[in-house]
Amino acid sequence: MPTPDEAQDPLIEQMRSRRAQLDRFLRRALPRRRQLVSASILFSSTAALITAAPAFGGQSFTAGLTDALNLSVPSWRLLCGLASAASVVASGATQLLQTSRLEEKVSRALAARARLEALEQGLLLGQFDRKAATDALLLCIETTALLDPGLERPAGGPGRSR
């Protein structure tokens, strides 16, 4: 339970506010990252399996599949089309993950969140002086500002004069 002085310390409040912003970002970004990685793995594996079936089964497999599905075209054409579609989805998910730099952003947010928590605890325990803590907070704000448009400098927060 924070003491009344801790609860009203603007520096500690800024650290908590920034951590809350990072938490909101991570609540959105972590599931998205997980979905894109899972889609990439699932669809690339599916493409490999679909192409492996006729490769290992040969002509008798594709002829049997064509008959079993009562297709008017050879089944290998259907399988190639499905494998191609799965491959496109897998590469699209991978490309979205890379172009959004989601992996990097999540890593930076997790590291910044941990730094802020350690900084807050160090300040509360008297391990950091206020100037060092303020400088560390400002650096953290600078390094996380471009992660997400919602992570702008907290209102009323400390500003760095240059």
Image: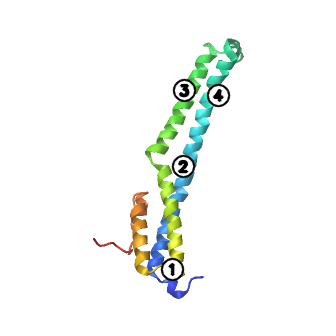
Q: Work out whether residue 138 can be spotted.
A: yes
Q: Mark 4 falls on what kind of element?
A: helix
Which corner quadrant holds the C terminus? bottom left
Q: Are marks 3 and 4 in contact (CB under 8 Å)?
A: no
Relative image position of residue 86 (x, y in whole percent): 57, 31
Within 10 angstroms of label 1, few (less than 14), some, or many (20 or more) residues? few
Residue type of the residue flagged with mark 3: Ser
Within 10 angstroms of label 2, few (less than 14), some, or many (20 or more) residues? many
- Identify whether 8 is placed above or below 45: below
Q: Which mark is first along the chain, 1 or 3?
A: 3
Mark number, residue 33: 2
- Identify whether 62 is placed above or below 130: above
Q: Are marks 2 and 3 in contact (CB under 8 Å)?
A: no
Mark number, residue 26: none
Q: Is residue 137 left or right of residue 127?
A: left
Q: Nearer the viewer, mark 1 or mark 2?
A: 1
Q: Is residue 117 left or right of residue 76?
A: left
Q: Nearer the viewer, mark 1 or mark 4?
A: 1
Residue type of the residue flagged with mark 4: Leu
Q: Which residue in the structure is indicated by mark 4? A: 49
Q: Work out whether residue 62 can be spotted.
A: no
Marks 2 and 4 sit apart, C-alpha to C-alpha, by 24 Å
Q: Which mark is first along the chain, 4 or 3?
A: 4
Relative image position of residue 106 (x, y in whole percent): 51, 55
Residue type of the residue flagged with mark 1: Gln
Q: Which mark is first along the chain, 4 or 1?
A: 4
Q: Are marks 2 and 4 in contact (CB under 8 Å)?
A: no
Q: Which color scheme does this rendered protein use?
A: rainbow
Q: Which residue in the structure is indicated by mark 1? A: 127
